[in-house]
Amino acid sequence: MLRATNRLVVSSKATIGLRAISTTPALLAPKAKLTGPKKAQGTKKWSASNQPAKPKKSGMTHHKFRDAVYNLNWDKYASELPPIPNLNVKNLKANSHMARYSPSVEAALSKFGGFKKGQYHELFEHPVTLANENTQRLNQEFISKLEGNSKDNRVYITGDQAIGKSTLVTQTLGLALEKFGQDKTLILHFDTPKVITNGTSDYIFNKDLGLYQQPMLTKRWVYKFRQVNEATLKTLKLTEDVKFSVKGKPVALKAGTNTLYEYLVQCHDFGSSTPTQGFQFFINQLKAHSKTVPVVVTVDDFNTLAEFPVTEYKHPDFTSIHATQFEMADFLFKCASGELNFAQGGVLLANTTAVSQHRETMEVALDQTKYDPFANKKYFDREIAEKLLQNGGVKEFKMTPLTKDDTRQLMAFWKDTGILQIRPDFTKKDYNKEEAFSMSISKQFENLVNLQYVSTQGVPGYLLRKSVMHY
């Protein structure tokens, strides 16, 4: 008996008669003609509709906060300053007061790097400063003597960390420009001499001078000097004839006819890849004109050069080059020692605590400690100490911290400009109260002044960080 099944059984014999499927006839068939107008070939036109979408920016930056506030021009978003006087010798009072720089002086100081990163000038629309006892003392001990020989007017600023040494140097430059006028003063400022020794510039040896020259470093600094002192340089006639070549063409400038500004603009010897006498001629002109125009030399962070004179550069025999063997450093040491004297002017040096304190060169140069003949050469350089002791030595100017009145005035200015926010001092008992908290602004502000003055010991840098950045 047969049973029904749902299986399909295919015999192998059934596949013998099947024909293979082939696509050859379809491929060999003639192509059909296109109907309609023929489209011209060409590139696709670019239009706004097919542009790639712009990536969305989150407003973030790769800079850290300290670098961001300095590089991103946050001062453009600062509120306007209240009316405060310009920093001027005539406006210096017995008591401390807030001041700002005139627009022309502010521009000059900015070009020379007078406003450093970490001073947080970006909090305000324009840089402001507190003229206090230190400003008045330095005015009497340095600025008032700028009409005398520079070798008799050499000052070295010292003080604790963040006490405002760089700020005092900037104040001095501003006061000098305001006192004598920007067309009757020559400012030579070095914001940090570390660039001379850190190995970041090219250098060549000048056999005639016996010194190494740094063309790119010298060229950049001369350019800044020319920008800041343009008004004065245009009034100074050359005292000697000078010849040099520009792109293979000889150039001759005549004494009494051409100006020192023309020389600095036309002469390219400062950045030449071959040894030149351009910088030496420039120094000789400064010395000659110092009889009528004060020459102010300021060097911030001077101890980075004096106490770390072994540079990153090498002699042909791969031994380290000493800082005094570079033309630019040699010029600074001659100014600081009084060997290079200007008939009118002064030399202002400033210390920095950002480097090791276990150095003895400046301590011996300032006559703070006695010379030890067995001192380690790594921590003491006898040659530099002896240079700085010449011509009566460099006078130390030790900065004093802010008084309580200075602290109150500075914090009151921050409060008035909206930088310092006075908040209620919550305690657990007051916080649990349901009624509104009533606070006396003046009382809370005075409590804050007392707290910050005690905790910072009158150091302006710490006061700014604790009151504005961390409060």
Image (spheres, rainbow, N blue to C red):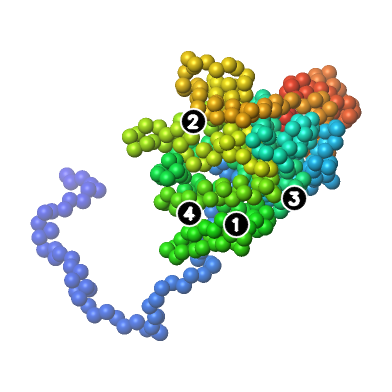
Q: In which quarter of the image is residue 463?
A: top right
Instruction: Judge the density around disc 3: few (<14), some (14-19), many (≥20) Cα neighbours within 10 Å.
Output: some
Instruction: Judge the density around disc 4: few (<14), some (14-19), many (≥20) Cα neighbours within 10 Å.
Output: many
Name which residue lies at 84% across and 21% down. Answer: 430
**355 and 457: which one is in front?**
355
Quarter of the picture containing the N terminus is: top left
Q: Return the mark for residue 309.
A: 2
The residue pinned by badge 3 equals: 181
Above or below residue 345? Residue 34 is below
Q: Do the residues labelled 4 and 3 touch (CB within 8 Å)?
A: no
Q: Return the mark for residue 318.
A: none
Q: Return the mark for residue 238.
A: 1
Q: Quadrant of residue 149?
A: top right
Task: Name the kind of residue labelled 1 in the image.
Answer: Leu
**23 and 195: which one is in front?**
195
Task: Name the kind of residue labelled 2 in the image.
Answer: Pro
